[in-house]
Image (cartoon, helix red, strand yellow):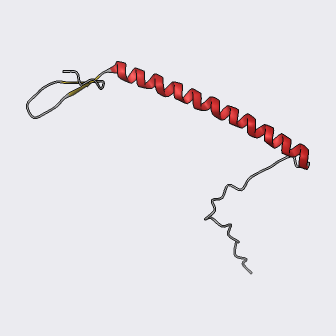
Amino acid sequence: MSRGDGETALPEAGRSPVHLEAKVFDLMTAWIERYRRQAEERYRRLDAVLAAMNDDAASITGVTDITTNNARDDEQPTKEKETA
């Protein structure tokens, strides 16, 4: 009996064995791969935009490397205790 969700249930007393259909997994894999490629392309475009912004900022300010502080707002830098 097909349930329409990629699984075929076989009727048995007290149990519900399921047969997984490879075609459905192939379709899912293709969708995931397509989504991964799209996301990768978006990140490449974002990297290009950020690099261009960095170049523009460097030409305006004369600073050749603009870095950011990646610490979260609730994480404050700690000072190491000096030992004498």
Say whether residue 31 is left or right of residue 23.
right
Q: Single out the residue that lies furthest toward the bottom.
A: 84
Residue 11's image quarter? top left
Q: Assign the C terminus to one quadrant of the image.
A: bottom right
Q: Single out the residue that lies furthest toward the top.
A: 23
Which residue does the image show at 88% across and 49% down from the upper left? 63
Residue 8's image quarter? top left
How far from the left and from the top, in percent, is residue 27?
Answer: 41, 21
Say whether residue 54 is left or right of residue 62.
left
How far from the left and from the top, in percent, is residue 83?
Answer: 72, 78
Say whether residue 44 is left or right of residue 56.
left
How far from the left and from the top, in percent, is residue 26?
Answer: 41, 21
Which residue does the image show at 71% across and 37% down from the upper left? 47
Say whether residue 78 is left or right of residue 26.
right
Residue 15, placed above or below residue 74 = above
Which residue does the image show at 84% across and 40% down from the upper left? 55
Taking depth in this image into account, of 29 and 79 the one nearest to the observer is 29
Which residue does the image show at 36% across and 18% down from the upper left? 23
Residue 57, placed above or below residue 16 = below
How far from the left and from the top, in percent, is residue 65?
Answer: 83, 47
